[in-house]
Image (cartoon, helix red, strand yellow):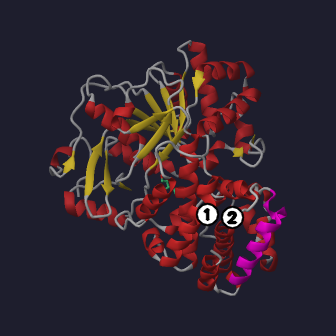
Amino acid sequence: MARLNKKTLGQLPVAVQKPSPTSGRSKNHILHIGVGGFHRSHQAYTWHKLRQRYPQQYADWTILGVCLMPADRAFVQQFAEQDYLYTLRMRAADGNDDVVVIDSITEVLYGPDDTAAVVHAIAHVDTRIISFTITEGGYNTDFDNHQFIWSNAHIQHDLEPGNPPKTVFGYLARGLAERKEKGVGGLVLMSCDNIQENGHVLRHALLAFLERYDPVLKKWVADHVSFPNSMVDRITPVSTPDDKADFEARFGLHDDMLVVSEDFFQWVLEDTGLTDIPPIDEVGVQLVGDVRPYEAMKLSILNAGHSLVGLLGDALGYTKIHEAVKNPVIAAIFERYALREAIPVLPAVAGVDLRVYFRTVRSRFSNAMINDATARIISGSSDKIPKFLLPVVDKNLQRGDPQVTVAVLVVAAWWYYLHRANKQDGMAAVVDNKREEIKVLFADESTSADQFLQYRPVFGDLSANPVFVTNYTKCVSMFRKEQVTELLNHVLEGA
Ligand code: CS2
């Protein structure tokens, strides 16, 4: 079957929205690092809409993508073969969908093969925004004590200016140094990852790196670069062979880069320091003075809720999020978590009723059309749980009447997942940056639950908290006896 590219684009039926042609070569005002499905369903879609609405004025707001992970080489090659065109299929729960071919990405570089080109692009006068979806772990920050992680061997390698860079900080340092030399001025560095105060975290991490790399450059960056915080939201599962086969059957072309997402979209961006940026608020971006309440709401209800549904669902044998969330006990536990544990410790968000927000999130999770897997949600839990769930626990533990029973259950369910994975195949199938460290904690199964909770890089000093430990021990003991349904009911009855 023919593949989607510039030549075949015209063969797609009218049901697919095709980009109207824009003239000439654009200038790539945006450089984006981490061109995964989420970037393509969210930021690339937004820039696409802007260019479609204002084809003359904002034709140059296209994206030069950069991938840095070893597994990305083949992806970059395939994307080039499609002339960087891809389809976004936004699927509503009622079966309706919007199918759009996106053309806002004009090229993608694979950093290790094209290091000089990436560095020069960072320094290029046309580049106005560098945005990032590099995952929570990509910021190389110990979130427990807010310190940059110097023990990372790749960071040590990147501190030597003569070495070809391996980390995002190494690339930025070299590119920004060139930019400063050329005198082309500052730019915006925009984090689009699920981290509270993602802009501040990026700024802190980059300035920490530059302090050792080149303190004069650090000062220049602090003075010339802005780091807006943002809240980004659109559930984007990994597209499956079935998704691609379905696309082929309906539309007659093959698209290796197909992205399937839900129809919901939200992007809340801090509007301070955003000079010379086009009016993306006209294509769905909310510009606000303080993004932090929005971030807290989304991380604590949606992302922590995802972990809850994913881990409890997995414990009950579900593999899909939409099926797990329809289980009445899981749905009720999610509600208890939101109403009793999360919402009471969240700041107010102007114009938003947090209970309504929760119900919308729960109904988004039940969208069968996006077919999200519990495995995607559970992957990377050692980066996710400390940023999504544990801040809610911390805030509760500072209150007179802490409400943490569901959060503790989720942590125990994570232990249970690892416990089973360890017995099954020594955690071979576990996808997690800290898998090797975690495996060591499970060397002796009889003490693994305690060892796990004492693992400071994830849990900080939570194992010293008697409220948390008492609840956790109860949950673990029932999980060990495989009394999963009883345990979930027990937590609910505690209501
Ligand atoms: C998910 C997120 O990975 C996860 O655990 O919670 O990828 C989630 O789907 C997005 O943040 C939605 O905006």
In the drawing, does residue 288 fall left or right of residue 460?
Answer: left
Question: Is the CB atom of the residue marked by disc 2 within 8 angstroms of ligand 1's nearest atom?
Answer: no
- The structure residue drawn at horizontal position 41% and vertical position 61%, both measured from the top left corner, is 364
Label 1–label 2 contact, CB within 8 A = yes
Asked whether residue 104 is in view, the answer is: no
Residue 198 position, x and y percent, is: 60, 40
- The structure residue drawn at horizontal position 55% and vertical position 50%, both measured from the top left corner, is 297
Residue under circle 1?
Answer: 340
Query: Which kind of residue does numbered mark 1 sit on?
Result: Arg
Residue under circle 2?
Answer: 403
Which is more toward the observer, 403 or 474? 403
Q: If the image is split into quadrants, where does the C terminus sit?
A: bottom right
Q: Main secondary structure of the magenta part?
A: helix
Q: CA distance from mark 1 to mark 2?
A: 7 Å
Of callouts 1 and 2, which one flags the residue occurring earlier in the amino acid sequence?
1
- The structure residue drawn at horizontal position 74% and vertical position 82%, both measured from the top left corner, is 477
Q: Secondary structure at mark 1?
A: helix
* Disc 2 residue crowd, few under 14, some 14–19, many 20+, Cα 10 Å: many
Question: Is the CB atom of the residue marked by disc 1 within 8 angstroms of ligand 1's nearest atom?
Answer: no
Residue 480 position, x and y percent, is: 71, 83
Q: Specify the segment rendered in magenta.
A: 461-478
Whether 187 is drawn above or below 73: the answer is: above
Which is more toward the observer, 59 or 307? 307
Say whether residue 465 is magenta. Answer: yes
